Every structure is written in structure tokens, then in C-alpha cells.
Image: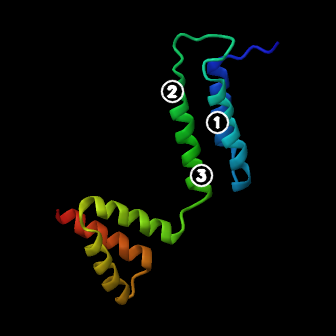
Amino acid sequence: MVRLNQSKFFNKAIEIIRSCNSADHLEAARRVVDQYNFLGDGFSERDDNYDHEYNMYLLMAELKTLENKLQPMTSEAQIEEILMEADAYGVRQEVINTASKLMEEGHARVESFEIAFNNLTNEK
């Protein structure tokens, strides 16, 4: 019977995620995180300093960082994210209007929304 140590498995999972260097590797990284979560407290060797929830958070953060690096957001997704944040500040329509003016002046689409959002939220 193989004995699993919580800390060693966590370190190996982090190592696997960090070693991924293409979008093709993302599925393997996701499976490692899923397997780690599935094991949960079912490890055969106990470590009293081990915190499964915290380590899962770290693994998920590593995976998200990798996903963002290997699968950058589309322009439309970036704009939608800016608009969602603008909505939280109550300046969504102002951002849209200002971005439209900036695009007419020759700014790129995403850049226009970023500038508009930053200018309007810095004023508040």
C-alpha cells in the first residue's frame, strides 16, 4: 500500500502546476488539483500542521495564475470585466460614453475602456 503524505503531495501538485508551459498542459494541472481535493483528509500519513482548505486555496490560485498566463482574456472579456467593475462604482454608462469618444480619437478598443474607467474612478 502506498502511503500518502499531505505536505509531499501538496508540494508535488504545486510543482506539476508550475511546470505547465502550454495550454495543452492545463488539463493535467486541473486533474492534479481535483485529485488533491478529492483526497482531502484521506491521506494515510497525518500532519498536524496541515490545513487542507488553505492548501487548496493555494493550488487554485496557482492554477488560476497559470490559466491567465496560458489563456489570456479576449478583448471582449477584458471590456466586460472593466464594465462590471465600472458598474460597481456606478459609472458604467459614463465609461461606455468616454470610451466611445476615445476610440473616435484613435485609441484601441480595450485601451479606451481602461483609460475611461481609470479616469472616472480616480475622480470619485
SS for dot 1: helix
Quick one: which residue is furthest to the left in this view? 124
Q: Name the residue tied to disc 1.
A: 33
Say which label, 2 or 3, has the lower sequence index: 2
Residue at the disc numbered 2:
53
Closer to the camera, 61 or 88? 88
Report the residue at 64% width, 36% height from top: 33
What distance separates the C-alpha of mark 2 from that of mark 1? 12 Å
Image quarter in which the C terminus is found: bottom left
Q: Residues within 10 Å of mark 3 (few under 14, many from 20)?
A: some
Residue at coordinates 71% horizontally, 47% vertically from top-left?
27
The N terminus, quarter of image: top right
Q: Amino acid at mark 3?
A: Glu
Q: Give the residue number, with chain letter if any, for mark 3.
A: 67
Using the image, determine if residue 28 lies above or below residue 23: above
Which of the two marks, 2 or 3, is nearer to us in this view?
2
Q: Is residue 70 visible?
A: yes
